[in-house]
Image: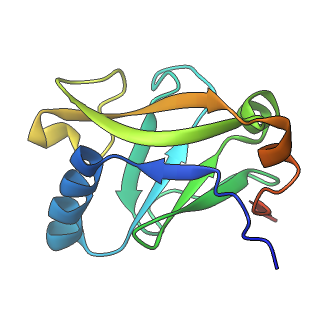
């Protein structure tokens, strides 16, 4: 049986920040919206601190924490692998849990090859 291709990964720097946030807040979740105040920066919340809209896409987990994407944004980026990273400084929005640490989560994208795209892990949709 062939191993499914993940849609999501995280850098070591992002994992370090996630571990710090886990120690302070417990279970987490991520949500990446399609624009407005927060731009398209991924936001980190305490689990249950944000409710995905109907048909938003959960593309995977990072250290067991769900990573949700706005349904319209997912349609645009469904051909891309997401790598969660972190940078120094404050992003647009400021509602994300890493903001008080002086950091901002960001996503780096790369397109899947046609072979990868045919063998992706399925997404979960909110109801």
x and y percent of residue 60 in the render?
60, 61
Side (left or right) of 87 relative to 23? right
**Most foreground residue, 57 or 48:** 57
- The answer to which image quadrant residue 15 occupies is bottom left
* In this view, 61 is above or below 14: below
Q: Residue at x 75, y 62 (%)?
A: 121
Side (left or right) of 116 relative to 60? right
x and y percent of residue 21 in the render?
21, 61
Side (left or right) of 18 relative to 110? left
Q: Residue furthest bottom?
A: 1
Q: Residue furthest left?
A: 101
Q: Residue at x 20, y 38 (%)?
A: 99
x and y percent of residue 88 in the render?
16, 27
Q: Residue at x 73, y 52 (%)?
A: 57
x and y percent of residue 81 in the render?
62, 40
Side (left or right) of 104 relative to 45? left
Which quadrant holds the C terminus?
bottom right
Q: Residue at x 85, y 37 (%)?
A: 114
Which quadrant holds the N terminus?
bottom right
**Most foreground residue, 45 or 79:** 79
**Most foreground residue, 11 or 27:** 11
């Amino acid at each position: 049986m062939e191993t499914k291709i993940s849609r999501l990964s995280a850098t070591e720097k992002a994992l370090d920040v996630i571990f710090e946030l886990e120690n302070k807040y417990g279970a987490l979740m991520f949500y990446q919206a399609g624009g407005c105040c927060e731009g398209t920066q991924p936001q980190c919340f305490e689990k249950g601190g944000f409710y995905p809209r109907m048909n938003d896409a959960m593309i995977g987990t990072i250290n067991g924490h769900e990573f949700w994407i706005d349904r319209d944004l997912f349609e645009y980026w469904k051909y891309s692998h997401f790598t969660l990273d972190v940078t120094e400084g404050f992003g647009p929005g400021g509602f994300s849990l890493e903001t008080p640490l002086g950091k901002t989560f960001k996503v780096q994208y790369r397109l899947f090859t046609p072979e990868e795209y045919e063998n992706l892990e399925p997404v979960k949709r909110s109801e």
